[in-house]
Image (cartoon, rainbow, N blue to C red):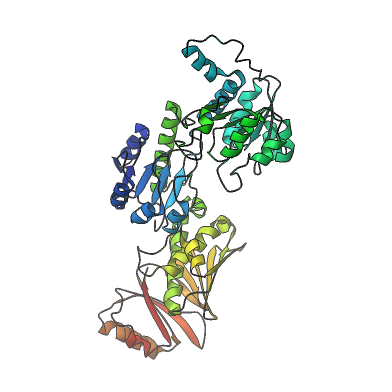
Amino acid sequence: LRMAPVSVKRVLISESVDPCCKTILQENGIEVTQKQQMTKEELIAEIQNYDGLVVRSATKVTADVVNAGSNLKIIGRAGTGVDNVDVDAATKRGIIVMNTPSGNTISAAELTCALLMSLSRYIPQAVMSMKDGKWDRKKFMGAELYGKVLGIVGLGRIGKEVATRMQSFGMKTIGYDPITPPEVSASWGVEQMSLEELWPQCDYITVHTPLMPSTTGLLNDTSFAKCKKGVKVVNCARGGIIDEAALLRALESGQCGGAGLDVFVEEPPKDRALVNHPNVISCPHLGASTKEAQARCGKEIALQIVDMATGKALVGAVNAQVLVSSFSPDSHQWILLGESMGRVLKACTASKEPFSQVHVTSLGESLKKSTGFLSSAAVVGLLTEVPQKGPNLVNALPLAAETGITVQTDHKDNEREACVLEVSVNGRSYKAVGSVQAGLPVLLELNGSVFRQPVPLTGYLLFFKATNSTELLLSVTGVLAAAGVELQSFSASTGGGGEQWYCMGISSLLGDIGALKSLVKEAAQLTV
């Protein structure tokens, strides 16, 4: 992932993902290997051979797996959430992690509704009783859903679908969500309120949030105590949102009248106390287990990988927000510009000291959304020691922070489109200004010297700072000629007297730049 598009040639699918996933990838020229039930050791041994990995839930993509994947550029999960992927480790390695958040929305919502209905009429318990040869009409007295209050915690895609379906049963839907605006949820019939207001009103509660520190144990002893006695709860989201020990206590005391669980903290659960409780109905994590959801997720993850590899779009990425805007047609050249400017300043500072500050400013209306990837690209240029081995746009900013570099970004509306990069090393600051002209990245200014002609940032470049004189230029071209290096282009600065920066395009790098250093104040060469 030097630049978009990301090169993806070989992909490993480590689980049973819908066959359409493999087909779509292959139709787009990507080689696919499918291996199921690999041990962690097998996966670590194999992963270095692939650019991409596609998983569902069973494969645990730990830091060890990520670090073994020396060629990995993309990890795709055919499903919602990325609980089984170490996203931080992937980001540090510059690997994009993506999922398919909408693929199993309907399936998860329908299962939630099925559990709500089953809880209200004890259907699973009645089925078991019949299979046991009994005919117990009195034992399974239920209650109508009509007119009851359903509390929906988490009003994203799935919460919305559950709400509209349960409203058709005549349920009153109330909810809580820290992100979805109340007027949006009101438009699909859900009145939002705080959790404190919500708990005491509910006859039924269903949770549809990701599992994070703020949602772990959201329903616990304290919140159960605030609920109506006999409240029924459903969790088709993630194990742990409802505190399992607290739920068992609430079931034992009658504070909770029944629970429908599709997910558990540990899957499969070794402790069977909840599963075996007479008022608990449970499934082995079937939320996304429909033919349609699996086909949708398999298709979506494949198309997202293809769109990314062909440079069309970046969809579903959870850790590469900076890249999303970098998939517009002309962004490619601006990314090259940012990186090249970073490399020019790195070469010209010639300091072994680390940079302390980096400041990137984008100029011009059309670059308003580009500041993010321009700063990442500049940091890539500044941090790259060996081309092809350095950081990329995904991990540049986290790596900069780790090495103690402060990165600031700004945008200024300006007549011209340009990128300004300023860096500080040891209290000295250096500055470059560049732009994209006729589809090519060019350097306009370097440390106060404005070039007469823009310097095309391509090929082998030699920069030097010296006082302007004809003799100087003859001496420099003499050094080049002696080394068998041809001069291909030359840009001088517009400034009058004093020391100025010059740039020469040359046919190859000088074997020894020392010969030049005796003639000029400063000199640097690099390949762009």
Residue 192 visible? The answer is no
**Image quarter of residue 352:** bottom left
**Image quarter of residue 200:** top right
Task: List x then y, in percent, for residue 268.
Answer: 44, 36
Q: Nearer the viewer, residue 38 or 93?
A: 38
Residue 493 visible? The answer is yes
Instruction: Kindly identify the residue that appears in the image at 33 percent across and 35 percent down.
Output: 23
Task: List x then y, in percent, for residue 382.
Answer: 45, 69
Instruction: Kindly identify the residue that appears in the image at 52 percent across and 82 percent down.
Output: 495
Image quadrant in which the N terminus is located: bottom left
Image quadrant in which the C terminus is located: bottom left
Residue 330 position (above or below residue 189): below
Q: Nearer the viewer, residue 462 or 201?
A: 201
Task: List x then y, in percent, for residue 208.
Answer: 58, 36
Task: List x then y, in percent, for residue 491.
Answer: 42, 76
Q: Nearer the viewer, residue 285 or 161?
A: 285
Q: Does residue 182 appear to the left or right of 421 in the view shown?
A: right
Instruction: Kindly identify the residue that appears in the image at 52 percent across and 29 percent down.
Output: 106
Residue 266 position (above or below residue 414): above
